Amino acid sequence: MSLLEVTNLQVKFNTPEGEVQAVNGLDFSVERGESLAIVGESGAGKSQAVMAIMGLLAENGSVTGKAEFKGRDLLQMSRKELNKVRGCEIAMIFQDPMTSLNPFLTIEKQMAEVITHHQGLRRDEARAQAVEMLRAVRIPAPEERAKQYPHEFSGGMRQRVMIAMGLLCEPSLLIADEPTTALDVTVQAQITQLVGELRQKSNMSLILITHDLAVVAEICDRVLVMYAGQVVETGCVVDIFYRPQHPYTQGLLASVPRMNRPVDDELHFIPGNPPNLMDLGSGCHFRERCSRVMDVCEDDPPLQVAPDGRVSRCFIAMENGEMKRAEMVASGTDAEEDSTETAE
Amino acid sequence: MTAPILRVQDLAVNFTSYTGGLLRRKERVLRAVNGISFDLHASESLGIVGETGSGKSTLARAILGLIKPSRGRVMWRGEDLTLLDEEQLRQKRKEIQIVFQDPVASLDPRMTAGDIISEPLWTFYPNMASLQVEERARGIMKMVGLLPNQINRYPHQFSGGQCQRIGIARALVLNPKLVICDEPVSALDVSIQAQIINLLKDLQNKLGLALIFIAHDLSLVKHISDRILVMYMGSSMELSERDALYRRPLHPYTNALIESVPIPDPILAAQARQDSWLSGDMPSPYEPPRGCIFNPVCPYKVSRCETDVPALRRMEHGDWAACHRAEDLDLSIGPVPSREAPGTRREIN
């Protein structure tokens, strides 16, 4: 049984302008010890999907579907039951480490609260544990730092505090929503490395939400690409990076800036803007930005499962790998070399 | 060689704050920008790179006169901007414009795109006929890749990337000679960032603009800069030609910035992932370390680095570095991995 199994998740928001379809029939699962990346542009519905699972939607939001965590549906739980799960068995880290910490409380107090609440430990025991956890995320001088307030920490240190806080109850699932987007690159490198290490030590599952595929390559096993509230492709991280099937995934990959690319290369990008979620209409939602659009794209493309377990929502990918390979040879790329590389 | 249009000489900005309550008031000085000098020629683009708190935005604002510098000169086409009064400075801003980081927050939500773009025209040319203003606004919108028929829409009806295009249009409407872009793409999705970079590059070529492009990492600046200035805690660490900087950085900090750009390839990333050696935080800017400000985290430091402040020196090839060991360190970036990274091959799309 998967640790988390989400089926047909739908998230809608009622706004004065009309109904916004943020998530539109999302299915995915996370195994124990696995790390899954959910990738997509702003408005793809990746954050709202996990917010819905965690019961954190805004008031005008509504959710249908199923989200089974260890066999129990999170969406059917009462608030009280849910509170036992979140923060304890499922922890969450948000993008902005400043606004997700309470500026009026010392780090120690905020962290101890989690432990006393969930594990019923005494205050002093909880504090000792908080300090230990700060040490585990490699904050120097944790005893003194624990007595400080959030504003006395730098952005990277605050994010470490958030991670430490998330890990206090030894969750089986950590959800990280753009954990490094607000940080400098040097700090981003430190934080991704830290998350990777901690995960290996504790066999915790991870859902990493991001718009930047570069971060994914370093710490994730599997990738789920979302567009306009739907899955457009999933696969293991090597497949996604080396043999992306969906034109959107290909576009996302091509737009990642690379240090080893000649400077004069024109930067790739995906033309146009994401579709209006209030008026999605039928057909492939990506077709207006897709360079390989065909007549058939006016119909809804089904989510295809290939024999090797790869999933993609595109008519081109449906015609499977063979055709793609032929095309790559034609365009001057050595497809043979490509296949030997991944065999390594 | 022609004279540079902008000469920044020993520019410094200090912020003073007070701690310790009313009676035991203590003054603290934060040196946000600490003696920066560089030249910029017409139609050249300079990248300024540094982490949060390195003073790059403060530097930009000081050049524009939005913050009063504590020391130094900003020579704009032979005239010192720091000596001008408000009104004279305002007139100069026709020639120097800025694009801000947050595309949505820097636009007034109650003004239409057309109003936002034409506001500079109303301010500087109050007698311009409204038909002419609108025509100009529509022309600029087209130039930055917006549909002129969106002129009456409000910022919230545009996406982040489109809002940044409005910000660029507003900066260009007065035909400036220099545009300072303060992290114009940091708030945008990766897939949209390149659109804006390409647009800026394109406009620069077309209009012969000089460009100062501020960024917090080295991955995108590469595509838009002729030269790059690397800043750390208010000081220049390195000022180099672009190609030289990426091939062989002169300063260990530049090297750290290059190495921390994530590798978008799962196989290479697993191979290349060594400990990121730049551990720890930037020291407190109120109490900068003695000697070289980078010494507490520098893996190459020698005893001299803890006592002497290295000056920004001109090196053999004409690039500049502020490191005692710039000559003897070889920080060449290893040969690019021989395997073509995915995505660099011609994609089927």
Image (cartoon, helix red, strand yellow):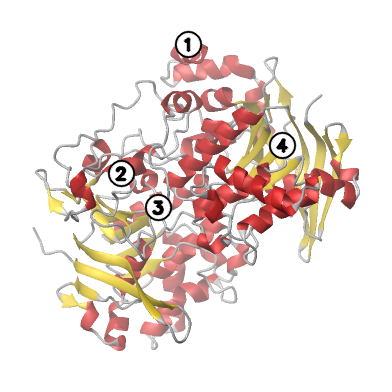
* Cβ atoms at labels 4 and 2 below 8 Å apart: no
For residue B16, which quarter of the picture?
bottom left
Check disc 1 and report the residue beneath it.
A340
User: Are labels 3 and 1 assigned to the same chain?
Assistant: no
- Would residue B10 appear left or right of A126 to someone viewing this image? left
For residue B28, which quarter of the picture?
bottom left
Instruction: Answer above or below: position of B141 versus B64.
Output: above
**Residue B314 percent location from the top left of the image:** 12, 51
Check disc 4 and report the residue beneath it.
A173
Which amino acid, by three-letter code, is at mark 2?
Cys
User: Are labels 3 and 4 assigned to the same chain?
Assistant: no
Instruction: Answer above or below: position of B254 versus B186.
Output: above
First-in-chain label (1 vs 4): 4
**Residue B55 percent location from the top left of the image:** 35, 63
Q: Quadrant of the N terminus of chain B?
A: bottom left
- The label number, if any, that marks residue B298 in the structure image: 2
Check disc 3 and report the residue beneath it.
B216
Q: CA distance from mark 3 to mark 2?
A: 19 Å
Q: Which secondary structure, mark 1? A: helix
First-in-chain label (3 vs 2): 3
Q: Dot 2 falls on which chain?
A: B
Nearer to us of marks 3 and 1 is: 3
Q: Label 1: few (<14), some or many (≥20) within 10 Å?
A: few
User: Are labels 3 and 2 assigned to the same chain?
Assistant: yes
Which amino acid, by three-letter code, is at mark 3?
His
Q: Which secondary structure, mark 4? A: strand
Q: Is residue B330 visible?
A: yes
Q: CA distance from mark 3 to mark 4?
A: 32 Å
